[in-house]
Image (cartoon, helix red, strand yellow):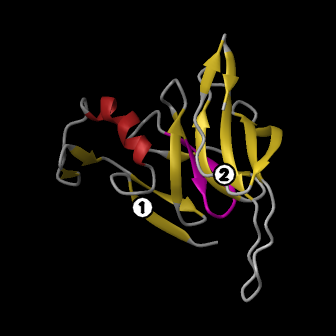
Amino acid sequence: MRTARRRLVRRSLPVAVAAAAAFAAAVPVTASATQTGSFRDIDTLSIPGGSAEIADVTRDGKTVLYTDADGTVGFVDISDPRNMILDGDPVDVGGSPTSVAVSKDGKYAFVGVQTTKRDEGEPPEITPGNLVVIEIATRQIVHRVDIGWGPDSVAAAAVNGVPLA
């Protein structure tokens, strides 16, 4: 598994920057910190699998959930933005995750997953995509629903207190 080093102000964990911005305001800029526009690079993190793509933050602002093209959703503890750490093992979602959204009550992560298989030189095997629901506290998949080919984006909502994706 290759490991890539990514900067927060670029693609790997863009939401982490927003979540950490409140903390960053209280952190003095040192000689090792760089500034790009209104963002300051305060830490970097190596992500197993190579690339964090889409991210969301838990409602308490302490954990980033990110999708990785290797078929997982990972977790990063950002409670100390100067010392971010991977938080447990990533959850294998059984395909290529395209997006992640944390439920309004903070209990679940909704993940859009493409499951179409593509072998080199062969036509793709079109299969339904999934909406995968992960219980954040246990890091377990608690529900999976076929939703059609090529899910690309998920948003979280709530109606009468019931989490919806």
For badge 1, the amino acid type reads Arg
Location of residue 158 in the rendering, given as x and y in whole percent from the top left corner: 63, 19
Report whether residue 142 is seen.
yes
On the picture, is 42 further left or further right than 101? left
Provide the major secondary structure of the magenta segment.
strand
Residues in magenta, as a range: 65-77
In the image, 64 versus 85, the foreground residue is 64
Alpha carbon of mark 2 to alpha carbon of mark 1: how far?
26 Å
Q: Which picture quadrant has residue 20?
A: top left
Instruction: Please tell me whether mark 2 sits on a helix, a strand or a loop.
Output: loop
Q: Which mark is residue 6?
A: 1
Give the amino acid type for the residue marked by disc 2 in the picture: Pro
Q: In what quadrant of the picture does the C terminus appear?
A: top right
Q: Is residue 115 above or below residue 20?
A: below
Q: Residue at x 55, y 30 (%)?
A: 58
Q: Which residue is mark 2?
A: 151
Q: Is residue 79 above or below residue 13?
A: above
Q: Quadrant of the N terminus?
A: bottom right
Q: Nearer the viewer, residue 4 or 133?
A: 133
